[in-house]
Amino acid sequence: MYFGRGKNRIHVDYTIQDIYKKYTKNIEKGSMYDISFKEFTDICVSFNQKAMNIMFLEAGTIKALSRLGQFQIMKSKQSLDKLSVDFKSTNEAKRTIYHLNEHSNGYRGRFFWSKKNAYLKFKSFYMFLPTRTHKRKLAELIKTNNYDYFITK
């Protein structure tokens, strides 16, 4: 548990080891569900990759089990008052330069977790942070103009 300053003041992460310990606590030794940690991680990685492929390649929505909401990729028009600074170009030009997203006609893509119908206590405290690999994959799809089928906000 992390009690620091800033945006995520109270921060609790559950690792795959924590999830595996909880899983094995309820499984009898020798049953068909008794699997090694390696097999468990392979299953989790495979599932997550298939879920991301559905969102990336089919513009699908992933409904989480146990009424935990929906995950999808959204595109939205970038407003002029909330432009992101292009730090590389700013440092080279010695003046502030913004990302205008001209390659995507001003649209911005992002991962979105809809908690509207989620059955969670204190759901505003939860957040979804995709891995860097998946963020880069989304950026690549946007830059190659293969993103038009994403849901517009």
Image: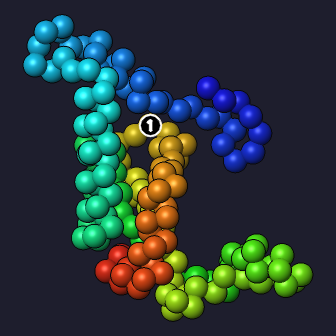
Residue farthest to the left, as pictured: 32
Which residue is found at the position 30% from the left and 27% from the top?
Answer: 38
Which residue is found at the position 70% from the left and 47% from the top?
Answer: 7
| Badge 1 amino acid | Lys
Whole-percent x, y for residue 97 in the image: 77, 83
102 or 124: which is nearer to us?
102
Whole-percent x, y for residue 14 in the image: 48, 30
Location of the C terminus by quadrant is bottom left
Q: Is residue 66 in sight in this rendering?
A: no
Q: Is residue 134 in sight in this rendering?
A: yes
Where is 11 relative to 107, above or below? above
Whole-percent x, y for residue 29 in the image: 18, 7
Which residue is found at the position 47% from the left and 53% from the top?
Answer: 130
Please identify the quarter of the rendering in which residue 56 is found: bottom left
Residue beneath disc 1: 121
Whole-percent x, y for residue 142 in the image: 45, 78
Where is 118 relative to 14, above or below? below
In the image: residue 147, left or right of residue 66: right
Where is 122 relative to 79, above or below? above
145 or 61: which is nearer to us?
145
In the image: residue 34, left or right of residue 133: left
Where is 57 relative to 117, above or below? below
